[in-house]
Amino acid sequence: MSCEQFEEQVSAYIDHELRDEEAEILFRHLGNCVSCRKAMTVALDLRSGLRDQAPLLAPEELDEKVMSMARSRQLWMPDRVAVPVTMWQRRISMRVPAVAAAMFILLFGGFFASSLWLGPNDSAANAKVQTVYITTLPAVEVRGYTP
Amino acid sequence: MQPATDEQLVDRIRKEGSLAFTPLYHRYKHRVYAYCYRLLRHPQNAEDAAQETFLKIHRSLHQLDSSASLQAWIFTIARNEAFTILRRMKPSEDLENITDDVWDDETPLERVVARERSEILQHCLGLLRPAYREILILREYEQLSYTEIARVTNLSESAVKSALFKARKSMGKKLETILKGKNNELRAI
C-alpha cells in the first residue's frame, strides 16, 4: 500500500470508519512514516478547527416564515390522521348523495320486497288465518272465567 | 413534549402526519440553516434555502420511509434546495457576506484569535470545489456517517471515503498556503 492510500486510511480512521484489522495495519505504517503521521495531525487539526467554531443559528425570522406557512397549509389541507382502532370501532365514511341513494334503495326496496313477501291482500285468505300463540308460560287459572 | 430521539420523532410523524412538523422543525432548524449557509455563504440565500427545505419537508412528510435515517432525508432535501440556489447565484455573491459569530464569554484577544481562525477556515472551505466543500460540511459539521453522506450525495460509500480524503488534503494545502502568507506578512512588519 502506498503513502497516498495510507493517507486515505488516516482520513477514514478519524471518521471511525476503519475496521480493527485495517487500523492495525495503518498504525504499523504510521510508526515508520513521518509524512503519514503529519497527515494524521493535519486532519485532526482541521477537524478540531472546524468543529470548534461557534454554532451558526437560524435567524428568528425563519421561525415566523416557516411556521406561518405550516399553519396555512394545515388549515387548508388538514392531514388524515391514522388512529389505530379495532374492527368494530371503524366508521364508514360516505358522501351525502351516496347516503341519500342508499337510504332511498333501502326504504323503497324494503317496501317492494315486503309487498312481494306478503302477497295479494285477499279477504277470503285472511278469513282462514288462525292466530296461534306459542308461549312457555304456565297456565294461569282465573276465577269466574271459563273459556 | 419534544421527542428525545429521531426514532421517536419518526414514530410521531407516522402517527400524526404533518402535525409532528413543529418538533421536527425545532430540532433541525439551526442545522439546516447552518448547512445551507456554509454551502451558499450568503445569509439571505441560506434563509431562503432553509425555508424551501422545510416547505418541502412539510409537503412530503407522508413519504418519509421510517426505516431510513431522518437526518439523511432532511439533508438530501436541503442539499437540493441549496444547489438550486447555488446554480442561480452569481460567482461574486459566493464568498461574500461572511459574518462571524463568536462566543460572548471570550476576552477581546480570544475573540480576535477565534475570529481570525474562523475566517481563515471559512475562507479555505469556500475555496474548495463545491463537491468537496459539501462533503466536508456533512462530515465535520453535521457529523453524518459515510452511509448517510452516501445517501445524501447519491455516491457510493467508497466514493465518499475517497472524496473526504481529497477534500481534507485540498483544504490542508490551502490552509498551509494561507498560513505561510500570514507568517511572511508578520515577518515584513
Image (cartoon, helix red, strand yellow):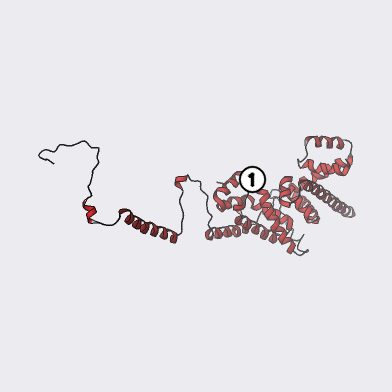
Q: Is residue A62 left or right of residue A53?
A: left
Q: Tell which of A99 and A58 is nearer to you.
A: A99
- Indicate the amino acid at tag 1: Ser
Q: Which corner quadrant holds the N terminus of chain A?
A: top right
Q: Is residue B62 visible?
A: yes
Q: Residue at x 74, y 45 (%)?
A: B146
Quadrant of the rendered image containing residue A120? bottom left
The x and y percentages for residue A9 are 82, 42
Q: Residue at x 71, y 58 (%)?
A: B82
Q: Which corner quadrant holds the C terminus of chain A?
A: top left
The x and y percentages for residue A71 are 55, 58
* Residue that badge 1 annotates: B67
The x and y percentages for residue A22 are 81, 37
Q: Is residue B16 left or right of residue A141?
A: right
Of all chains, the one bearing label 1 is: B
Q: Tell which of A6 and B171 is nearer to you.
A: A6
Q: Secondary structure at mark 1?
A: loop
